[in-house]
Amino acid sequence: MRKAMLSQPMAGKTDEEIAATREKAIKALENRGFKIINTLFTDEWYSQEKMAERGVVQIPLCFLAKSLENMSLCHAAYFCKGWEKARGCRIEHNAAKAYGLEIIYEDTDDAAQP
């Protein structure tokens, strides 16, 4: 089964907005036959407290690193609206393009070949 990850801007969004965007994206990808690889890290390991205990200084960079690791499991990356304005999403886009993942954009719901 082909696998895909989501790249979505989260800064300035409520938990409800993030969840709604994710649900829509997951449905779109599942309709295309993809299995979704998680890139929303909410378990205790990624809590502020645990990151501080591990000495993480750049928390957004820690999340990005894990997201890129999970990208290695994927055939495609789905970029939610506004991705081009979010630093982490732009980095994920560059990596997806450089490594030949299929790129799918929410705003067009069309695939771009690498």
Image (cartoon, helix red, strand yellow):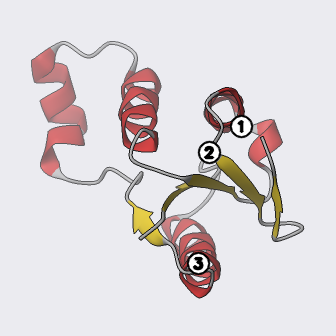
Q: Residue 27 in the image: x percent, y percent?
A: 57, 84
For this view, does 72 lie left or right of residue 99?
left
In space, the residues marked 3 and 2 are separated at their CA atoms by: 15 Å
For badge 1, the amino acid type reads: Ala
Q: Residue 16 in the image: x percent, y percent?
A: 53, 74
Viewer-nearest of discs 3 and 2: 3
The residue beneath circle 3 is 20
For badge 2, the amino acid type reads: Ala
Work out whether residue 7 can be spotted. no
Of labels 2 and 1, earlier in sequence is 2
Q: Would you place residue 27 above or below residue 49 in this image?
A: below
The residue beneath circle 2 is 11
Q: What residue is drawn where x is 46% and y is 31%?
A: 64
Q: Residue 75 in the image: x percent, y percent?
A: 53, 52
Work out whether residue 56 can be spotted. yes
Q: What residue is drawn where x is 42% and y is 38%?
A: 72
Callout 1 secondary element: loop
For badge 3, the amino acid type reads: Ala
**Dot 3, how many residues are within 10 Å of its Cα: few (below 14), some (14-19), or many (20+)?**
few
The residue beneath circle 1 is 86
| Residue 9: mark in rendering | none
Residue 61 occupies which quadrant of the picture?
A: top left
For this view, does 79 lie left or right of residue 3?
right
Of labels 3 and 2, earlier in sequence is 2
**Dot 2, how many residues are within 10 Å of its Cα: few (below 14), some (14-19), or many (20+)?**
few
Q: Quadrant of the N terminus?
A: bottom left
Viewer-nearest of discs 2 and 1: 1
**Could you tell me if the residues under marks 2 and 1 are in contact, i.e. CB atoms within 8 Å?**
yes
